[in-house]
Amino acid sequence: MSSDAVKTVNKWLITITVMLPTIMEIVDTSVANVALPHMQGSLNAGTDEITWVLTSYLVSNAVVLPMTGWLSRMFGRKRFLMTCIVLFTLASLLCGMAPNLATLILFRVIQGAAGGALIPISQAILMETFPPKQQGMAMAIFGVGAMFGPIVGPALGGWITDQLNWRWIFYINLPIGIVAIVMCALFIFDPEYLKRKAGDLIRIDYWGLFLLTTSMGALQVVLDKGQQEDWLNSSFIISFSIITVISLIALIWVELAHPHPIVNLRLFKNLSFSAGNLIMFVVGFCLYSSIMLIPMFLQTLMGYSATDAGMVMAPGGVATLVTMPFVGAMLAKRDGRKIVLAGLLIGSFSMFIMQGLSLEASYWAFVWPRIVLGIGLAMIFVPLTTVTLSVIPRDEMGNATGVFNLLRNIGGSVGIAIAATLLSRMSQLYQTSLVPHINQYNPLFQLRFNELKNSLIAKGMQATQADQTAMGMFYGMVQKQAATLAYNWIFFIIGLAFLGIIPLLLLLKRPRHQTDTIEIH
C-alpha cells in the first residue's frame, strides 16, 4: 500500500479517535445540568451548594485549557491525551460513586481538569492531520461532534435521571472512555517536532502555573457568583475581583518574560490570531447567553416543561449539524472571512426576530429563530476556527487551540453572568414603569379587573377574597410582561454584539492553501 493510501486511512481513523473524547467531554458538561435537582435531593445540598457541581468543573476546565500546549510539549501529546482520557473516565466513575457533595465536587474538579485538555488537543491533532486545503472540512467534522453534545446531552441526561438515577449520567462515560483509550494507543502518534521539544523543557514555569490557576479560578468564581452576591455590593466578589485583576497582570508580565511559558502570549503579536480570538470571545458571549435565556423564557414565563424547552432548542442544534459539512466544503473554495460575515449577520437577524417574542407566541415562533441562529453559528464556528488557527505554526498549534477555546468559554461565562444580571435589573425597571398603569383611575384596568373579579365570584369565591386574588393575578401578569420586555431588550443587545464584531473581520488574514505550513506526520 502506498504512503498516500496509508495517510488517507489514518486521517479518518485519527478523526474518529479524537472525536470520541471530545463528544464524551461535551456531553458530560451539558448532561449534568439536567440532573442538578436530583443530586440536590440525594446529597442533601442547598441550591447554592449544588451549583458548585457545575462551577468546580468550569473552574478546573478554565485553568487547564490555556496550558494544554505546554503540557503536551512537556509530557508528549499522545501520553498527555491518554492520561487525560484515563483521568476523565476514572473521575466519571468516582463522581457516580460519590457518597456526599464534598467528594462529588472534588471528583468534578479532577474531571474538569482532565476534560479541559481534550478539546484543544483534538483540534490541534486534526489541524495537523489534514492538509491546509482540507482543514475547513476537518473543523466541520469536529464541529459536528461538538454539536452532538448539546443536542443529545440534556435529553440523554433527563432520560437517564428519570429512568435510572443521576449517578448513571457519569457511568455512561466508562465504555466511551475505554474505547477512546484503546483507539488513542493504536492510532495517535507524536509528530517529530514534539519529540524534539519534549527534552528541551527543563525550566518549569511555576509562577505562570500558580498565577494562571489563581486568575482563572478567581475569574470563574466572580462570574458564577456575581449576580447571586449582588456584584460589588459584596466584599466576597470585590476580594475575588481584586485577586483576578492582580494575578492576570502578573501572569502577563511573567509569561512574556519566561523562555518556556505555560501560556505563550507572544502568539497575540499576530494581529489575525488576536482578532480571531476577540471575535470568538464575543461569539461565545452571544451563544452561551442566548442558549441560557431561551429555555428560561420558556420555562419561567410560558410554562413549558424541561423536555418541551429541550424540544425547542434541539432543532437549532440539528440545523447547525446539517449546515456544518456544507460550510466545510465551501471553505475549500471560498474566503472563510466572508462566510463568517454571513454567519454574524444571520446570528444577528435571529436575535432581532427573538426581540419580538411575546407571551402569546407559539412553539414555532421560538423554533424558527433558533433554527436561523443554528445556521448562523455553523457559518461562524468552522471558518473562524480555520482562519484563526491557519496563521499559527504547527509547533504552537496546541497552545493556540487552548487559548482559542479558553476565550470562547470565558466569553460564554461573561455572557451568562451579564445576561442574568441584566434580566434581573431590567425586569425591575420595566416593572416599575408598568405598575403605575394599574390604578383605579385607568378605565381599561377597571374593566379587566371587574371582569376577572366577577368570574372568580361566579366560581364561588367570596367578594373580598376575589378582590385580593384578582389583584394578585394582575400583579403576576405585570411581572411576566416586565420580564418579557427585559428578555426582548437583552436579545436586541446580543444582536448588536454580533454586528459589533464585523469590523474585526478586516484584521483576519485569508489562509493561503498553497503554503505548506502544516505537514502530515
Image (cartoon, rainbow, N blue to C red):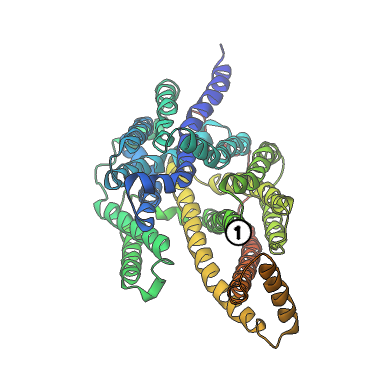
On screen, residue 359 versus residue 428, left or right, reads: right
Residue 226, visible in the rendered structure = yes
Find residue 339 and report its horizontal and vertical position in percent.
Answer: 69, 49
Find residue 222 and report its horizontal and vertical position in percent.
Answer: 38, 63
Q: Nearer the viewer, residue 13 or 190?
A: 13
Question: Residue shown at 66%/68% (left/top)?
Answer: 456
Q: Helix, strand, or loop for circle 1?
A: helix
Quarter of the image for residue 237 reads bottom left
Residue 67, visible in the rendered structure = no
Find residue 18 and report its horizontal and vertical position in percent.
Answer: 48, 31
Question: Residue shown at 33%/36% (left/top)?
Answer: 91
On screen, residue 100 versus residue 224, left or right, reads: left
Q: Which residue is mark 1?
A: 297
Q: Is residue 143 above or below residue 347?
A: above
Report the residue that reaches farthest toward the top: 1
Question: Residue shown at 56%/14% (left/top)?
Answer: 2
Find residue 76 and report its horizontal and vertical position in percent.
Answer: 34, 33
Question: Residue shown at 32%/66% (left/top)?
Answer: 240
Inspect the image, locate mark 1, and give the three-letter code of the amino acid beneath it: Phe
Q: Nearer the viewer, residue 358 or 422?
A: 358
